Amino acid sequence: MDNIVNIIIDGKEYKVPEGKNLVDVAKAQGIYIPTLCHFHEVNPPLGTCRICTVMV
């Protein structure tokens, strides 16, 4: 069984499986986080532009 963790995005709390990718979680909730390296054409993702930087 997956551990469930609480995260808060824009003041709203979500319960998600531990280890899930934050960009995927946000997208599933209809929340847009701009990214460049998350495109399927970029493999592996570089993570160097920092456009998707979020406060943790």
Image: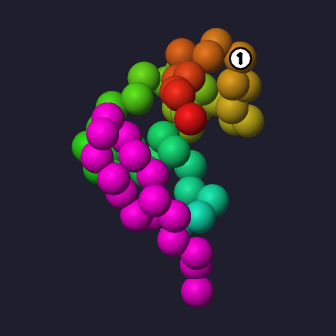
The amino acid at mark 1 is: Thr
Residue at 73% x, 35% y: name it. 44
Q: Nearer the viewer, residue 50 or 3?
A: 3
Q: Which residue is mark 1?
A: 48
Q: Nearer the viewer, residue 19 or 12?
A: 12
Residue at 40% x, 64% y: name it. 15
Left or right, residue 11 beside residue 53? left
The quadrant in which residue 49 appears is: top right
Residue at 42% x, 23% y: name it. 34
Total number of numbered labels? 1
Q: Is-magenta flag for residue 14?
A: yes
The quadrant in which residue 18 appears is: bottom right
Q: Position of residue 7 (x, y in %)?
A: 45, 52
* Residue 29 position (above or below residue 56): below
Residue at 58% x, 78% y: name it. 2
* Residue 26 position (above or below residue 44): below
Q: Position of residue 45 (x, y in %)?
A: 69, 32
Q: Position of residue 6 (x, y in %)?
A: 46, 59
Left or right, residue 31 beside residue 7? left
Q: Residue pushed farthest bottom?
A: 1
Residue stretch in magenta: 1-16
Q: How is the image coloured?
A: rainbow
Q: Is-magenta flag for residue 6?
A: yes
Q: Position of residue 56 (x, y in %)?
A: 56, 35
Q: Tell me the chief SS of the magenta region.
A: strand
Mark 1 is surrounded, within 10 Å at the Cα level, by few (under 14), some (14 to 19) or many (20 or more) other residues, namely: few
